[in-house]
Image (cartoon, rainbow, N blue to C red):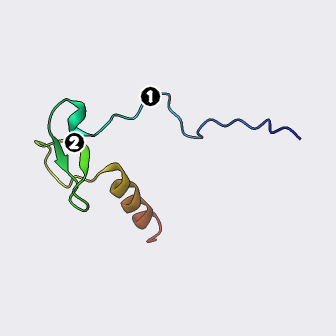
Amino acid sequence: MSDDRDTTAYCDTGTPHPDPAPEAGGPPFAECVLCRRPTEYPESYRGITLCPVCEWQEAQRTACSG
């Protein structure tokens, strides 16, 4: 049997995700307040900064808290 399903991501927008690693160049990035990994936000960003992983986990927690 052949698998003819489309293997592209369901929510793929076609735009690449920016690389938040500071060694990749660009402005210095703020640290995540939970895990201390680099975020997608510059150091000058005000407010709570979360890395993409912690941001996703926080969204899951708040979505299920009803």
Q: Residue furthest left?
A: 44
Residue flagged by tag 2: what amino acid is it? Answer: Tyr
Residue 10: x and y, percent? 60, 40
Residue 14: x and y, percent? 50, 28
Direction from residue 53 to residue 40 in the image, left or right: left
Residue at image point 54% right, 40% down: 11
Q: Residue 2: which quarter of the image? A: top right
Residue 56: x and y, percent? 40, 55
Q: Which residue lies furthest to the front in this view?
A: 23
Direction from residue 56 to residue 21 in the image, left or right: left
Residue flagged by tag 1: what amino acid is it? Answer: Thr
Residue at image point 23% right, 47% down: 38
Direction from residue 16 to residue 31 in the image, left or right: left
Residue at image point 53% right, 35% down: 12
Give the CA distance from mark 1 to mark 2.
18 Å
- Residue identified by numbered label 2: 41
In this view of the protein, which residue sits in the foreground, 3 or 64? 3
Q: Mark 1 or mark 2: name the one nearer the start of the chain.
A: 1
* Mark 1 crowdedness (10 Å alpha carbons): few <14, some 14-19, many ≥20: few
Numbered disc 1: secondary structure: loop
* In the image, residue 19 above or below residue 53: above
Please tell me the numbered disc located at residue 15: 1
Q: Which residue lies furthest to the bottom in this view?
A: 65
* Mark 2 crowdedness (10 Å alpha carbons): few <14, some 14-19, many ≥20: some
Quadrant in which the N terminus appears? top right
Residue 41: x and y, percent? 22, 42
* In the image, residue 55 above or below residue 10: below
Task: Report if the CB atoms under discs 1 and 2 are less than 8 Å apart.
Answer: no
